Structure formats: C-alpha cells, structure tokens
Image (cartoon, rainbow, N blue to C red):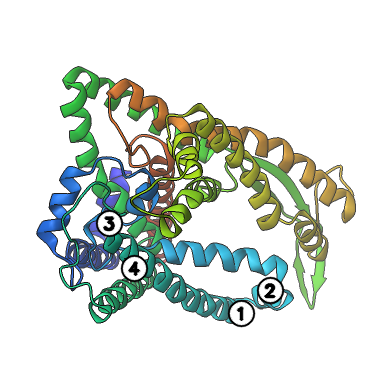
Amino acid sequence: MLSAFRSALATPDLRKKILFTLMIVAVYRIGAVTPAPGVSYPNVQACQAQVEDQNIFSLLNLFSGGALLQLSVFATGIMPYITASIIVQLLTVVIPRFEELKKEGQAGQGKLTQYTRYLTIALAVLQATGVVALADRGQLFRACDQPVFPDDSVYSLALTVLTMTAGTAVMMWFGELITERGVGNGMSLLIFLNIAARIPEEGANILNNAGGLTFFFVCVLGLAIIASVIFVEQGQRRIPVQYAKRMVGRRMYGGTSTYLPIKVNQAGVIPVIFASSLLYLPDLLGQLIGDQNEVSWWQQFLQTYLTDQSSWVHILLYFSMIIFFTYFYITITFNVDDRAEEMKKFGGFIPGIRPGRPTAEYLGFVLNRITLPGSIYLGIVAILPNFFLSVTGSEGNNQNFPFGGTAVLIMVGVALHTVKQIESQLMQRNYEGFLR
C-alpha cells in the first residue's frame, strides 16, 4: 500500500490528482466546522459539553464527521445522497423505465445520476428542516437550556435550512469533482474522511474513561478486527466461465476462460445502514410529534428496548435485520437470471452446467450459500461496538466507535477500493512505457 502511494507521488499525472483530492478535502473540512447562519456557536459548544447521550443521531453524526451536532454548513452531510442513491437503485427493479435506462449504458446512467441529484436535494431539504426543528425545540441537545437559535424567526430558520441544503449540494459537487479529476470514488472518500475525523476524539474518550492499559488493549484488538475485515472483504467465490469460439466477420472471438467473482460480502455496508436507520426511525418520529416536556409510555419503551444500544433486544433485532436486509439487497442487485442470459448471449457457459435456466439456478444456489456467512459476518462486525463499550466504560453513542460497526466497514472498503484504483493506474502507465 505504501509503495503504491510512493510510486503514485512520483508519477506527475497521479500526483496532480492526489493533490487536487487533498485540496477538495481541505476545503470540505473548513466547511464542516463553519457554523450555519443564525446558529449561536458558543451555545452549541456548551450544549455539546453538557449532553452525552446522542444515540438517536449517532449515524447521521457519523456520516457528517461531527458536523451535525455542530450545526455547521455541512450539517446534513452526505447522507441524503446515500439515501437517494439507494432509492434510485432499488427503483430500477420496480420501475420499468429506470430498468431501461440502466441497460442503455452511459447515456441512461447519466439520466439516473440526474434523478439521484434531484432526489438528493429534496431529501436534504427534509433532513435540514428536521434538524433545525429539533434544535429549535431543544430535542437535538437534550437537557440543554441554552438557545441554539437566538433569533428563532421563520426567516432566520428558513435561511439556516437553505444554507444546509446548499451545503449538501456543494458536498455532492465535491464528490463528483474527486471522481472525475481526483483519485477514487468521491462520495466514498468524503464518507471515509468524516469517519476518520471522529477517530481522535473517540480514542481520547477511551483513554480518559478507561485508562492507558485498556486503550492499548483496544488498539491491538482494533487492528486485529481491521485485519479480519480486510481478509473477509477480499474473499470471493470464483465461478469458472468458458466462452465458445465464434466468428464475427473475419475475426475469431471467444475460446477464452475467465471467472465470475462473487464476494463473501456482496452487499457491502448497505444492510447495516438500512438496519440502523429503521431502528432509530420510531424514536426520531416520536421526538418530532411528541411533547418534549412529557415522555409517553411508548416513547419510554422505544428508548429502553430499541434505542438503547446496550439492550439485548436491540442487539438481537439489529443482528436479525442485518441478515434480512443482506439477503434482500443481494436479491435485488444481483439478478441471476440476467447474468445467465448475458452469459448465454455472448456464448459463455459454466463447465458442467447447461446455459440458460440451469445456469441461473446454479448461480442462485451458490449465491444463497455464500450470502449466509457474509450476512453473519456483517452482523458480528456491526454489533462489536456494543461489547466494546462494556470493556472501555464509554457511555452513550457507540456507532462512532472507530473499530467496529459501520465505521470500520466503510473505512476498510473505501481504502481497499482507492488503493486498487491507484495500482491499476500505475500498472497501465507502466505497460504504456514498456510498449513504447
């Protein structure tokens, strides 16, 4: 990994891309700590120091790099874009028009990207409105009596919502710039940056609460977890595929052997995001429509059994939902019938399996067998912070714990993808130099 970055810095073209990516990252981090207009930054800092339990907003705060609870320009983060991308991807299975656009190639993908942008802005408006409403009602920072918005007029709050929505649009633009002119996937790198920005603070909390010996133990165990996640993320089942020879004009095509890779973690981190969002949604809706001065019995029930991440009901339900969403997401995104039809169209077949329906049944059989260990792996990694907190003595939020859950899955996945992209570009340039 280090040798790849060293070689990339020595290549002028790649060096420009890396420097451009770092410049975008620096500008983004400045915006992440810049308070939105109408927000009293000293009062926000005072409320953050008083309030420890922010479980309900842990996932949003994780993807915003802590900008949410600072009510900064980028408070809504990249979460609206992630949600919009998932919705559009799922709609390609439901809406025939979207499925046709997906099959049209680059032109159709461009239209789907445009729909994703529009949906991102709409979701950003909704999320920014919800955040501002919760902060104004005193439910974003519980048990804090200092006013976050000194001027809580409709005009001032609308300006704050507009600024946060524009911040999401700017983040989306930054991500596309990194993808086009930088290194790696822009949106993924921004998420990686947000999570990495939380590691020093979380490490300091563990050191202060549990002491140096526990901190050292957590670091060693964290490195072992990261190594295990890398090992599983790289694991795949390679199904051999043989292509028959065929004549196209005067040229002979086919006659080659390749393989169809099926990863152990085919769904990525999407099932974890789905499960986390659904578990926190009832409590969030209860805060929006409930009375902030009086907690009803069902709100108390949700906070005790669903929102409390140390509850065994929460852990078991979270684990079960991750397994369910893993199967659900893979079934939608990996269509075995389409794969079998594509292989048959280009003269490909699996040795010992007839093309067409038998190939689809075989792919479904392999996919179901490999999805089970992949879903269990996702569930175990996701609930690791619940057990870490009992060792470290930390309280409240465990989604931001740096060595488990959503954080380590995203960071490892993005790091591996970025390194592979750099290595592929270096290999391409080396081959060009050799041929010349």
- The C terminus sits in image quarter: bottom left
**Mark 3 or mark 1: which comes first in sequence?**
1
What's the CA distance linking mark 4 and mark 3?
Answer: 37 Å
Horizontal relation, residue 323 to residue 16: left or right: right
Kindly tell me whether residue 76 is visible in this rendering: no
The residue tagged with tag 4: helix, strand or loop?
helix
Q: Which residue is mark 4?
A: 178
What's the CA distance linking mark 4 and mark 1?
Answer: 22 Å
Horizontal relation, residue 47 to residue 92: left or right: left
Q: Quadrant of residue 54?
A: top left
Q: Return the residue nearer the eye: 335 or 292.
A: 292
Q: Which residue is mark 3?
A: 138
Q: CB of mark 1 within 8 Å of CB of mark 2? A: yes
The residue tagged with tag 1: helix, strand or loop?
helix
Q: Counting other residues with Cα less than 10 Å from the Cα at mark 2, is it few (<14), some (14-19), or many (20 or more)?
A: few
Q: Return the residue nearer the eye: 147 or 262.
A: 147
Query: Residue 225: image x %, image y %?
Result: 40, 29
- The N terminus sits in image quarter: top left
Q: Quadrant of residue 133?
A: bottom left
Q: Residue at x 84, y 50 (%)?
A: 359
What's the CA distance linking mark 3 and mark 1?
Answer: 45 Å
Amino acid bearing label 2 = Lys
Q: Which residue is mark 1?
A: 108
What's the CA distance linking mark 1 and mark 2?
Answer: 7 Å
Horizontal relation, residue 263 to residue 71: left or right: right
Q: Which residue is mark 2?
A: 103
Q: Residue at x 40, y 25 (%)?
A: 387
Amino acid bearing label 1 = Gly
Amino acid bearing label 3 = Gly
**In this view, the mark in front (3 or 2):** 3
Query: Residue 152: image x %, image y %?
Result: 22, 72
